[in-house]
Amino acid sequence: MPENAASAAERLQAVLTTLRTTMDTQISTAPSVREEHSHGEAMNAACLPEAVVFAESTDDVSAVLRACHAQRVPVVAFGAGTSVEGHVVPPEHAISLDLSRMTSILAVNAEDLDCRVQAGLTRQSLNAQIRDTGLFFPVDPGGEATLGGMCATRASGTAAVRYGTMKENVLGLTVVLATGEIIQTGGRVRKSSTGYDLTSLFVGSEGTLGIITEVQLKLHGRPETLSAAVCQFENLHDAVQTAMEIIQCGIPINRVELMDPVQMQASIQFSKLEGYRPLTTLFFEFAGAPAAVQEQVSATEALVEANNGLGFAWAESAEDRSRLWKARHDAFWAAKALDPQARVISTDCIVPISRLGTLIDGVYEDIKASGLRAPLLGHVGDGNFHTLIITEDTPEGHAQAWELDKKIVARALALEGSCSGEHGVGMGKLDFLETEHGAGALSVMRALKNTMDPHHILNPGKLLPTGPVYQG
């Protein structure tokens, strides 16, 4: 039978037959395994993959993609399944390629502050294993995400205001292209003036141009001193103004996070944050040499006082600091606990920091008009915040949440922002890409996709909305 006459089911079975000759024990069609790989943490509808293949090496990934490319079978990379915009939801008749077994640290170069890891390793595991070197990897999205997945979505997090996002902390990659060809991008040096910047092309490509299997990461020295504090405000604008002035004054703060009163109430209940009130709250972390930390603290305290802050509550011990930041990272679950039967839809956007107050004012208007509960929190040091939309877990509830999400993003775009500073596009933000980037830029992106993945087998339907392709 000619290849183009075979059905999608027949082509997929041909791929599995090929792979079973060398990877039989790494392939699962068990219903429970398929269900686990049918969704992330988004509200997008799940879809069962036909099979899950557990890769254990770059060569395994290459073998899978060679077979899928030959048979035109879609394949979706899967790490920890923590994405919130539908990145890992497979299309019909697809293979889910799970990289979570690829967890080795391949090299640590302590003198040069870099390391090389396999893509299935998590940030938490990396930091635990290199603790004795005095180094750490700082990009902290909060969940148990894999480093390959963090690269694919160009992840950010609470420490981005000081250390940057994945884009700034990746030196090089090993990538398997749609054809199965393996390439290396970047290297170990901190800068290079040669060739196209392919590393940056793949960081944030959401598995649509190639599958990342190894990552060369920048490491950073562990700070000599860490100090954390919480400050509450009667007025949200005062809190936002404080965060904005911290950045404008060049204070090298480690983290500055915001919770609005609704989120703070939820976190007080869920995380047992005794002694705090349900007010707008800033969480601060300062890091460095003792004298430098004291200088940061003094400058920040002066700004807090000038903006009507209600004073600092300090977390001096490591246990207290950990409790505060765990409460911040558990914000989603705290919001969920407000109504355990409801669905919590997490969305994010980002604007220039000077426009954050204007955006939040508008978002509050939209939330009030929607009739929904929607706590706000975010990385206000870089203008990025999240809205946790609490809604009934019904089609009508999802539609109501989606309408609110669209209004929030539209406000951000009107203020020269982006539809996502952290979550990525996946399927959830496709509708906003043309407004943000323009039709011309999207046509060039589609031309890149067509060149590098001519059969569109790599995570189809994600990142790029359909439309015209640049022809040259």
Image (cartoon, rainbow, N blue to C red):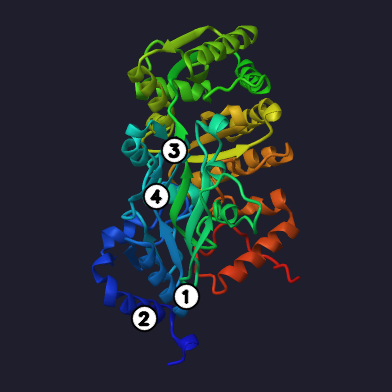
Residue 365 lies, in percent from the top left, at: 65, 29
Amino acid, disc 3: Glu
Amino acid, disc 1: His
Q: Secondary structure at mark 2?
A: helix
User: In this image, 413 relative to 343: left or right?
Assistant: right
Residue for badge 3: 111
Q: Which residue appears at 41% of the width and 38% of the height?
A: 110
Residue for badge 2: 14
The dot on residue 460 is: none
The dot on residue 69 is: 1
Q: Gap in Å between the C-alphas at discs 3 and 2?
A: 48 Å
Q: Are marks 1 and 2 in contact (CB under 8 Å)?
A: no
User: In this image, 465 relative to 215: left or right?
Assistant: right
Q: Secondary structure at mark 1?
A: helix
User: Is 390 rendered above or below residue 228?
Assistant: below
User: N-terminal of the two: label 1 or label 2?
Assistant: 2
Q: Which residue appears at 25% of the width and 71% of the height?
A: 24
Q: Nearer the viewer, mark 3 or mark 1?
A: 3
Q: Nearer the viewer, residue 105 or 345?
A: 105
Binning the other alpha carbons within 10 Å of mark 1 as few (below 14), some (14 to 19) or many (20 upward) gives many
Q: Nearer the viewer, residue 411 or 254?
A: 254
Residue for badge 4: 117
Amino acid, disc 4: Val
Binning the other alpha carbons within 10 Å of mark 4 as few (below 14), some (14 to 19) or many (20 upward) gives many
Q: So how many labels did they put on this image? A: 4
